[in-house]
Image: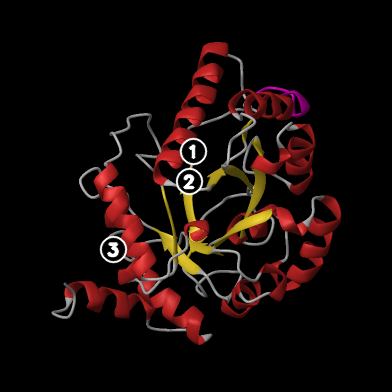
Amino acid sequence: MLYIGSHVSFKSDSGLLGSVKETLSYDANAFMFYTGAPQNTQRNPIDDMKTYEGLKLMKENNIKLENVIVHAPYIINLANNKEITKWEFACNFLRQEINRCNTLGVKYMVLHPGSSVGLDRKYAINNIIKGLNNVLIDDDSIVICLETMALKGTEIGSLEDIKTIIDGVNNKKNIGVCLDTCHLNDAGVDISRFDEFLDKFDKLIGIEKIKCIHVNDSKNELGSHKDRHENIGYGTIGFDNLINVIYNKRLDNIPKILETPYIDKEYPPYKFEIEMIRNKEFNNNLYSDTFKYYKGDNHE
């Protein structure tokens, strides 16, 4: 079964209900959101009524909770503890985000592992392990999905890094992996040979740990370590290679989430990207179709 969706908004006045309505407008059956701004720690209370209405609308439209993902704020950096108070704050803030997921009923959270920022890499990875062990409790139902990264600068997030983290975490049932196709490409993984990558992943970590896939094309060449997303089929990875990832039988039933750029930085392309993914047919007119849809009379 194909579960495909995108990043959607989560606004204080509409909460989960607004996120579900946006998802449905894209003809999607999966979605991902931040519970607040990803670049700061300000959070509004979660509206329980909007959550109830959102869950009801999901049920009416056959959107399963296991295909809903929360993305942890990218300002959380468990790898660096140069300033111990900031590291402790990051741990506490991650715990608060887990509690918000519990309130919403969401079971999967994507987390960037972090950056060493001047620390020894092994030491920084151990900081991540310590942080996760501090944050996770025995009866947690959340699964924190460590995201594969482009390895830009001092980023941590190679397969080897993630394996080391998983090996060190006490509550392994609470740790999964999120693959990001753009990040993999920029880190040096040839997506045209994706099954070879999955073989390596399965041997090193275990394919059952993959809980979410971010499907993005890349503006960059293989191994560039830059992390710049591109619209589906308009980048260096290419439409056919991404289709092969999305429809790979070994990843069936795992939610695929688009994080591709808005057209003119204003108009979400997801409705049309999801359409061409379902049709398995590249749309040369993605930009114009998206622009016309949002500027035309047919959009409400």
Q: CA distance from mark 2 to mark 3?
A: 19 Å
Q: Which residues are magenta?
A: 118-123
What secondary structure is found at the residue carrying circle 3? helix
Camera-near label (2 vs 1) is: 2
The amino acid type of the residue labelled 3 equals: Lys
Instruction: Determine crowd level at label 3: few under 14, some 14-19, many 20+ residues with C-alpha closer than 10 A.
Output: some
What residue does disc 3 label? 21
How is colour applied across the structure in the image? Answer: secondary structure
What secondary structure is found at the residue carrying circle 1? loop
Quarter of the picture containing the N terminus is bottom right
What secondary structure is found at the residue carrying circle 2? strand
Asked if the residue under mark 1 is in contact with the one under mark 2, i.e. CB atoms within 8 Å, the reply is yes
Q: CA distance from mark 1 to mark 3?
A: 25 Å
Disc on the earlier residue, 1 or 3? 3
What residue does disc 2 label? 71
Disc on the earlier residue, 2 or 3? 3
